[in-house]
């Protein structure tokens, strides 16, 4: 609200948007993966208060259109902050951070940040997250990988599930086998979804499939949940992760 109201006042030509404050607030939001994708584009572009004033003057020669523009552009960000981050996002973020692997935390942050603005990129980051967790768990204590360089996500997950004793074939209880089989199906689906609609491959055909934010949110949530399950299982077994 301080950032938005300061820019609304700046729309009127009032010199009360302190440049240092603007820079601080702008950096704070842009470095927050939970909301960085909702930062208005004109804020991303204007690195200081002077550049912002120049942009607003060019946008309109009148105060009111400028003020309304700023309020409208900030509405999604303020709405998200008022609603707060989803509980699942927070729980998964805390676990992945404690996992202490930069590649894993980076992939998760990218997946969160891109869900709405870049659904295809979010799906790719979701798969990268799960691949990184699997590879980390498959490395021995000396950091030597026990997987092949060309192993895909489903194969990596099968190896991890056997290592952690969560492969369906390792259990006799029917209900538990069904749950674990469903977990394997989720991983398989994530791999297929990423290959079909992620941004890691060129789209083929005249009508390429374009994922919507809701598809990206589903993929990211599933990948995060599976990553959390694998890490919690390894910790429960006393493995050094």
Image (cartoon, grey):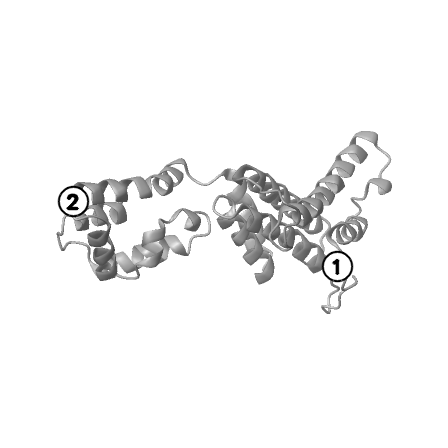
Label 1: few (<14), some or many (≥20) within 10 Å? some
Looking at the rendered structure, which numbered label has been put on residue 63?
2
Place of residue 27 in the rendered image (x, y in percent of width and height, measured from the top left): 35, 58
Which quarter of the figure has residue 177? top right
Place of residue 61 in the rendered image (x, y in percent of width and height, measured from the top left): 16, 48
Given this view, does label 1 or label 2 mark the residue nearer the observer?
Answer: 2
* Residue 48 shown left or right of residue 103 in the figure: left
Mark 1 or mark 2, which has the lower sequence index?
2
Residue in front for this viewpoint, 206 or 231: 206
Task: Identify the residue at image location x=47%, y=46%.
Answer: 117
Which residue is label 1 attached to? 138
Task: Identify the residue at image location x=66%, y=57%.
Answer: 132
Place of residue 208 in the rendered image (x, y in percent of width and height, measured from the top left): 62, 44
Task: Give the CA separation, mark 1 to mark 2.
Answer: 60 Å
Which quarter of the figure has residue 229? top right
Residue in front for this viewpoint, 240 or 133: 133
Q: Quadrant of the C terminus?
A: bottom right
Task: Identify the residue at image location x=63%, y=46%.
Answer: 197
Q: Secondary structure at mark 2?
A: helix
* Residue 7 shown left or right of residue 207 in the figure: left
Q: Secondary structure at mark 1?
A: helix
Is there CB contact under 8 Å for labels 1 and 2? no
Looking at the rendered structure, which numbered label has been put on residue 60?
none
């Amino acid at each position: 609200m301080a950032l938005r109201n300061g820019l609304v006042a700046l729309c009127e030509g009032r010199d009360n948007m302190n440049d240092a404050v603007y820079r601080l607030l702008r950096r704070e939001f842009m470095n927050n993966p939970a909301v960085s994708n909702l930062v208005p584009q004109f804020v991303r572009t204007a690195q200081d208060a002077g550049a912002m004033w120049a942009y607003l003057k060019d946008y309109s020669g009148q105060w009111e259109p400028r003020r309304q523009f700023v309020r409208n552009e900030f509405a999604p960000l303020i709405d998200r902050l008022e609603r707060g981050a989803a509980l699942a996002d927070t729980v998964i973020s805390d676990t992945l951070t404690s996992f202490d692997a930069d590649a894993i935390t980076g992939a998760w942050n990218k997946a969160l940040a891109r869900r709405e603005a870049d659904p295809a990129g979010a799906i790719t980051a979701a798969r990268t997250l799960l691949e990184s967790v699997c590879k980390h768990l498959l490395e021995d204590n000396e950091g030597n990988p026990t997987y092949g360089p060309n192993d895909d996500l489903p194969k990596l997950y099968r190896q991890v599930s056997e290592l952690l004793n969560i492969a369906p074939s390792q259990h006799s209880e029917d209900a538990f086998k069904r749950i674990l089989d469903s977990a394997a199906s989720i991983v398989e689906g994530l791999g297929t979804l990423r290959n079909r609609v992620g941004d890691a491959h060129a789209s083929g055909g005249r009508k390429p499939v374009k994922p919507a934010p809701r598809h990206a949110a589903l993929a990211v949530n599933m990948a995060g949940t599976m990553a959390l399950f694998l890490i919690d299982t390894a910790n429960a077994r006393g493995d050094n992760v």
